[in-house]
């Protein structure tokens, strides 16, 4: 994800940057993307698939595997944010 954030911020269209583009709303809410970004890729899902096809091999299977990893990351991020908010609200009591 770090590589993707760096690529995304600099406007490079890479596989990791496309994954960041797909997760942009959650990453922004989590504070991992702030301010103005160099560029956002239109239709990052299609860009990702195009890049995978250029690399050769089974683009479809690789695409699905990357999406599963991204969803897993997003869910872990959501759980972490929930725990942080819960802990903060308990401190205020």
Image: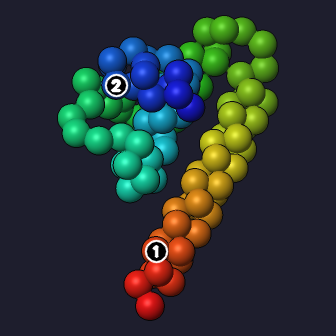
Percent across and percent down for residue 44 are 45, 33
| Image depth: mark 2 or mark 1 in front | 1
Which residue occupies 53% across, 74% down?
Answer: 87
In the picture, the quarter occupied by the N terminus is top right
Which residue occupies 43% across, 53% down?
Answer: 30
Nearer the observer, 43 or 25: 25
Nearer the observer, 82 or 57: 82
Q: In the picture, residue 43 is in which quadrant?
A: top left
- Give the CA separation, mark 2 to mark 1: 30 Å
In the picture, the quarter occupied by the C terminus is bottom left
Instruction: Decide: few, some or many residues near mark 1? Use Cα within 10 Å; few <14, some 14-19, many ≥20.
Output: few
User: Height in image: 72 above or below 45?
Assistant: below
In the figure, is residue 69 to the left or right of 43? right
Say the numbered circle drawn on residue 9.
2
Which residue occupies 72% across, 9% down?
Answer: 56
Identify residue for label 1. Answer: 88
**Residue 82 visible from this viewpoint:** no
Residue found at the far top of this picture: 55
Percent across and percent down for residue 91 are 47, 80
Callout 2: SS: helix
Nearer the observer, 24 or 33: 33
In the figure, is residue 52 to the left or right of 93? right
In the figure, is residue 17 to the left or right of 78? left
Callout 1: SS: helix
Question: Sequence order check: which comes first, mark 2 or mark 1?
Answer: 2
In the figure, is residue 1 to the left or right of 89? right
């Amino acid at each position: 994800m770090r590589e993707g954030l760096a690529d995304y911020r600099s406007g490079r269209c890479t596989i990791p940057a496309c994954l960041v583009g797909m997760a942009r709303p959650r990453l922004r809410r989590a504070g991992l993307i702030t301010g103005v970004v160099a560029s956002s890729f239109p239709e990052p899902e299609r860009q990702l698939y195009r890049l995978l096809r250029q690399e050769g091999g089974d683009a479809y299977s690789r695409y699905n595997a990357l999406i599963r990893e991204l969803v897993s990351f997003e869910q872990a991020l959501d759980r972490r944010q929930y725990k942080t908010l819960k802990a903060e609200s308990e401190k205020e009591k």
